[in-house]
Image: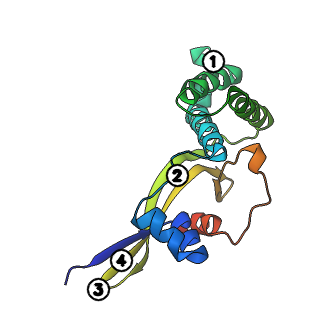
Amino acid sequence: MEKKIVAVDSQKLDAMQSCAYLYDTKFNRHLVSINTPIYLERGGLIHDMLTLYYNCRKYRGRWRQNNKSHIDIVRAAIVAGRHIANKMKLDISEVEETVNVFMQYTDHWENDGWDNILGVENVGAKILYDSDDLTILYEVKIDLILKIGNMIIPVDHKHSSSRRNPNEMANQFKGYCWFL
């Protein structure tokens, strides 16, 4: 008998817990909406800009020798974000609102001391369960992983319009902490 390997992540667990039909249509039959909801496009756009920003920020110590400053990196991420947005169905006002949120975020955290970036948009898997006939993997994609003091901290970015207090019992946050 061949060993079965199953991969789950927080989205799959959320769907399993909320509705079996949703899980089946989304993850087994791979049916998706023709139109991407605006909130997903805005979230994707800000993630793309933050990915570029934090990948450059990992090398902050080299900025000066390359005649770059924080604002140069922010501007480069905005240019890239606007280019990416050309392929989206977002209104210009939504793109500019997302750029504004990005600028506020980077201004707020410019001197945060987050210079020990361990990962940006890291993807990984860890064995959740293993037996002779079944392995269950838990998969993650973590926006930002920081080391502050002795702590390793996962960070998940949200667009300002989706700000809410995080549910500490959410599969996503429990999964990140367990994975790390």
Give the labeled residue for mark 1: 68
Disc 4 from disc 1: Cα separation: 48 Å
Residue 138 visible (yes or no): no
Q: In the rendered view, does 48 fall on the left or right side of 25? A: right
Give the labeled residue for mark 2: 33
Q: In the rendered view, does 124 fall on the left or right side of 19? A: left
Q: Amino acid at mark 1?
A: Lys
Instruction: Classify mark 1: helix, strand or loop.
Output: loop
Q: Nearer the observer, disc 4 or disc 1?
A: 4
Q: Coloring scheme of the render? A: rainbow
In which quarter of the view is residue 129 placed? bottom left
Locate the N terminus by quadrant.
bottom left
What's the mark number on residue 132?
3
Q: Amino acid at mark 2?
A: Ser
Which callout, 4 or 1, points at the residue further toward the start of the chain? Answer: 1
38, above or below 61, in the image? below
Q: Residues within 10 Å of mark 3 (few under 14, many from 20)?
A: few
Q: Amino acid at mark 4?
A: Thr
Q: Identify the residue at horizontal 44%, vertical 64% (top origin).
A: 27
Which callout, 2 or 1, points at the residue further toward the start of the chain? Answer: 2
